[in-house]
Image (cartoon, rainbow, N blue to C red):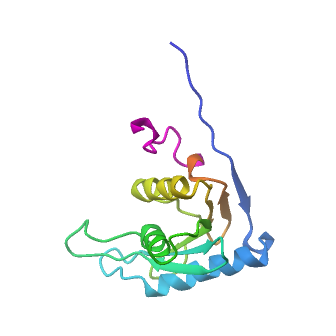
Amino acid sequence: MKELTITAVLNVYKFEELTEADRTLLQAAMDATKRSYAPYSKFSVGAAARLNNEVIVTGTNQENAAYPSGLCAERTTLFYANSQYPDQAVATLAVAARTERDFLDAPIPPCGACRQVILETEKRFNQPMRILLYGKEEVYEVKSIRDLLPLSFDGSEME
């Protein structure tokens, strides 16, 4: 037997340390949380994607009483971006989450289904997608979803 160690490298910033462009994108994700439809969990998530052409699109989580018929903010945003701008890769995806009281202190990562959709989007455009995860205390920067989804299944095994 041998042991395989998998590591992920994330950069951790204070919001003020980010570039103006990154702060603007995160603010768009934070603003999007106000449009979330989360009557059951009261947990609002917003996402904002900056495309290669500099267009910013946003999305929110959408809940449904017939769980799991809702959709996460990350997938809402990416599906909208891919359907409206099918020739534009997502350069950076920003995600923010809050409760009814306030934004979370620490960043939350995308769920497994969202990670898989982000991976597929990276593969579709043959370009890594930078991800910014907002928390009031710190912001995580991820260079590619592969850092959050090691040993990923991207369909290349079927080719």
Question: Can residue 137 be found in the magenta stretch?
Answer: no
In this view, the residue farthest toward the top is 1
Residue 128 or residue 1, whichever sits in front = 128
Q: Position of residue 39 (x, y in %)?
A: 31, 82
- What's the magenta region? 147-159
Q: Is residue 99 visible?
A: yes
Q: On the picture, is 63 further left or further right than 81?
A: left
Percent x, y of residue 75: 43, 67
121 versus 159 height, above or below: below
Pinpoint residue 125: horizontal percent, then vertical percent. Answer: 56, 58
Residue at the (53%, 41%) spot, across then down: 150
Query: Which quarter of the figure has residue 94?
Result: bottom right
Magenta-colored stretch includes residue 152: yes
In front of the other: 72 or 78: 78
Please say whether residue 134 is visible from this viewpoint: no
Residue at the spot x=35%, y=77% of the render?
62
Q: Quadrant of the C terminus?
A: top left
Q: Residue at x 50, y 37 (%)?
A: 151
Q: Is residue 12 left or right of residue 61?
A: right
**What residue is shown at x 47% (from left), y 68% (from top)?**
74
